Image: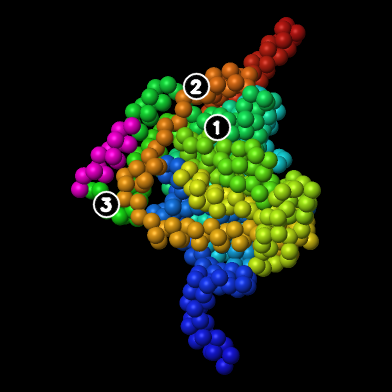
Amino acid sequence: KMLTFFTKIIPTILPILVLFSNHVKCKDTNLTSFATTIATYSPPSAIGPKDTITVQNKQLYIQSTNAKFYLKGIAFPDPPPSTPYNAQGWIDILHQLHNLQTPYNAVRIYRMDPKTDYSEFFNEAAKLGVYVMVPLTSAQGKGVINRDAASPKKCYTRSLFRYGKSCIRNYIHYPNVIAGLIGNEVMNSVQTWISAPCVKAYGRDLKTWMRHEVKKGAIPRVLPLVYAAQNTGLGAAASPARAMKLTVDYLTCIPNVYTWETVTLRRQQQEQELKTVSKNHENPTTTSTKQTWFHHKSGEMQKDNNDDDDDDEGMAIDIFGINVESWCSSFDTYKTNADGTTGTYYQLHQGLQNASIPLLFSEMGCGHDLYSHDLYDKEHLNDHYSEIKNIPENTDGPKRKKGERTWSQIPFVLNEMSDSWAGFFAYAYAGSPEFVMFDNGPWDGVHTLTPTADFYSWKEQLDKAMMVAAASNSTSEDTTNDAWMREVMTTPPLCSTVELELKEVCDIELQDFNQISSFVRQQEEPASEYLILLIVSLIVVGWASWKIVNVRQMQLSRKEYEMIV
């Protein structure tokens, strides 16, 4: 009877709660937040076979709906190295986040074994509407990129290429696998930049191999590739924002001048076609229809570009990630840090406006030890102390402890920066003690951990960002052509231009990327050719051996005859 009563009464009182929270200044802030959370949260839809994420120009899209996709993810914990994979343990974390009504849609996995069957985890994540970013390298063994080696034979090996292929074959059949990571903080100093051509060659070969496999029907799609860079400068000459721009430019640059000129001309023609057609009778009237039409039209062009057999124009990645540990005070803002310096997020947003691919924060969050104690340290803030009293605690969960983050950067990433940034992964569920969002760790690979105030702050900021986005979509209708054509394709730079800038600015001299041969051409010949070559080799070796033995026997026989005579 109680269940029947609440089933009938909740739909009746819910609109009243929402109306009350929007139009009445309620003294109990918890009631306001509670009503708003009930009204806004809805579990994400299950991910179907056609809901793969595609890269179109500088944005991510859901293939089945043509809707833009923004990553609102969390870094998944690593199980202990000695602990075997426990599917239920991994799934329980997904269920925990789901039961906490967390409005997230993705996880980033750091360590996986391409020989392991992860079907239970992937399938359950798809049911819960969660996408997964998978690693295509490993911390040890055959999947390692040696960032201290300049020679391609040492930092990019055949075993690494084979490792990447085995990963893709294992993971790519799941539609919620959003992308594969080909490297994490490999080139994070002037000294380790010597390995950059190896990272670029690895991405190039995997993309080329995947296109060939798709044409043969061996795999269903080309998996987008990601590189995650540490947000740090290159010596005194290049600021972090400039270093990130150099990194994304190098990994997407086109090595061949003729190819670059061809691509530039083709994209200029495509942009002009989009502008021309938009002014004719094909031009839609509403923003939503315009965006769908533009995505369809540019998607056709993108498909034409991807069908080319020119090693994907030399581009090694489809998405560029940045591991950022900034926004280290609750008084930081998008444009200005608490100490008065220019905001890190603003610098990155402005500095990477001309990147040719989508951007995301592959790790986001300041360490607890670096996060300003402004909520508790009166002497540190002086005049700001009056503001401390007005910073509200989370609606749910425990009170914040010293160093726990407020995550107030999230609305800016998902709104102000959304023209070129595709989202973020909050760092982290568990792992390094300075970044954990769940307590009582480390994670044992089986049991879930306890959410902290850090987690609840992250959750509430996600709720706020969703509300802002929903209000913006429902009240604004921008009918200008410029507003819906911001995503026109940007041509990647020429490699020689990027390499010259690296030399002049940072004194980094790289091996010519054109000189790094492809393992696809060297090793991917059909098995029948290897069999024929093996048979011919055996015949030649056998004949030569027989000939040598026969000649030797003839020589011995002749000596015996001479001795007898």
Q: Which residue is mark 1?
A: 245
Residue 148 visible: yes
Of 315 and 408, which appears nearest the observer? Answer: 408
Mark 3 belongs to which amino acid?
Pro
In the rendered view of the protein, which quadrant contains the C terminus? top right
* SS under mark 1: helix
Q: Which mark is residue 372?
A: none
Please tell me whether residue 312 belongs to the stretch shown in magenta.
Answer: no
| Highlighted range, magenta | 268-281
Q: Is residue 294 left or right of 131 when viewed as pictured?
A: left
Q: At x 38% / y 24%, what residue is drawn?
A: 261
Magenta portion: prevailing SS class: helix
The first of marks 2 and 3 along the sequence is 3
| Real-space CA distance between mark 2 and mark 3, rounded to the nearest whole angstrom | 39 Å
Q: Is residue 459 left or right of 301 when viewed as pictured?
A: right
Q: Which residue is mark 2?
A: 497
Q: Is residue 522 above or below residue 507?
A: below
| Real-space CA distance between mark 2 and mark 1, rounded to the nearest whole angstrom | 13 Å
Mark in the foreground, 2 or 1: 1
Q: Which mark is residue 284?
A: 3
Mark 1 belongs to which amino acid?
Lys
Mark in the foreground, 2 or 3: 3
Q: Residues within 10 Å of mark 3 (few under 14, many from 20)?
A: some
Of 173 and 554, which appears nearest the observer? Answer: 173
| Real-space CA distance between mark 3 and mark 1, rounded to the nearest whole angstrom | 35 Å
Q: Is residue 318 left or right of 332 when viewed as pictured?
A: left
The percent coordinates of residue 272 (x first, y second) are 29, 35
Of 34 and 80, which appears nearest the observer? Answer: 34
Q: At x 67% / y 44%, what residue is drawn?
A: 338
Residue 184 visible: no
